[in-house]
Amino acid sequence: MLQITSLTKRFGGLTAVKGFSCEVHKGEIVGMIGPNGAGKTTVFNMVSGFIRPNEGKVVFEGHDITRSRPDQICYLGLCRTFQIVKPFGNTTVLDNVVVGALARGRPIPNARARALEMVRLVGLYEYRNELAKSMTIGNRKRLEVARALATEPTLLLLDEPMGGLNPTEVKATMGLLRDIVQEGVTILLIEHVMQAIMNVSDRIVVLHHGEKIAEGEPRAIASDRRVIQAYLGEEYCIA
């Protein structure tokens, strides 16, 4: 579904990502972990068209999207969320999601119908007529996901959807991710909540200093000495 080949991004003299390669297959949840500054969000920005790589290639569903604009990539079915959620605060939850649904060029009644479906899916139906600025951080994260889902993606890139959430909200978000996959959407996920990403991911990719240092099933990643030393710490080691 998604093939990332040798992506490199330099900002002046700083190489933020170097030679990163990865594949995401239909129906998977692939986690991406690593220390702050490892290059994870930079990878997302390159894949989703917000910045262009200096080197490398991104192919989505057979289309070379390496130099495509974000709106073009979204129209093909790849959408992303952001680590810092910024809803339209003085607009209702439902109308925030309608904005996403309009990306497909639907008539407004159809966009509202799609938005209602996504608001219900993420568990915000009872808040649909509330202003977005009144939402808790957990519900704002869900709103961000609903708005992305309203664009009808087949691949969804989620940037720390569980950051700042309490344990109950984290558990609920893990269930939501599984529900999204059941709806036919594949997920590439950045997350620092290790208990969550280890339990929800089919595979995990690890970045450190802009380079991939490991990739595999969660159990293998949790016992990889390079990953333990670079990021996880001994408490996550599986003997």
Image (spheres, rainbow, N blue to C red):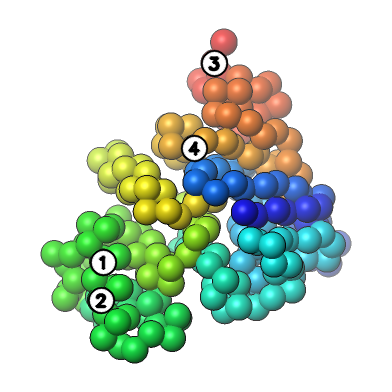
**C-beta proximity under 8 Å, tags 1 and 3:** no
Left or right, 55 with respect to 150, comes to: right
Secondary structure under the numbered disc 4 in the rendered image: loop
Q: 228 or 80: nearer the eye? A: 80
Report how far apart the C-alphas of labels 2 and 3 lie in the structure. Answer: 46 Å
Q: Report x, y in % for residue 201.
A: 49, 37
Q: Disc 1 residue type?
A: Glu
Secondary structure under the numbered disc 3 in the rendered image: loop
Report how far apart the C-alphas of labels 1 and 3 lie in the structure. Answer: 41 Å
Where does the N terminus fall, quadrant-wise? Answer: bottom right
Report how far apart the C-alphas of labels 3 and 4 lie in the structure. Answer: 17 Å
Q: Nearer the viewer, mark 4 or mark 2?
A: 2
**C-beta proximity under 8 Å, tags 1 and 4:** no
Q: Disc 2 residue type?
A: Ala
- Hey, which quadrant is residue 108 in on the image? bottom left
Instruction: Specify whether residue 174 is in view.
Output: yes
Mark 1 = which residue? 117
Q: 153 or 162: nearer the eye? A: 153
N-terminal of the pair, mark 2 or mark 3, is 2
**C-beta proximity under 8 Å, tags 2 and 3:** no
Mark 2 = which residue? 113
**C-beta proximity under 8 Å, tags 2 and 1:** yes
Q: Disc 4 residue type?
A: Ser
Looking at this view, name the residue that lies furthest to the left: 126
N-terminal of the pair, mark 1 or mark 4, is 1
Instruction: Specify whether residue 10 is in view.
Output: no
Please, is residue 139 above or below residue 211 in the view?
below
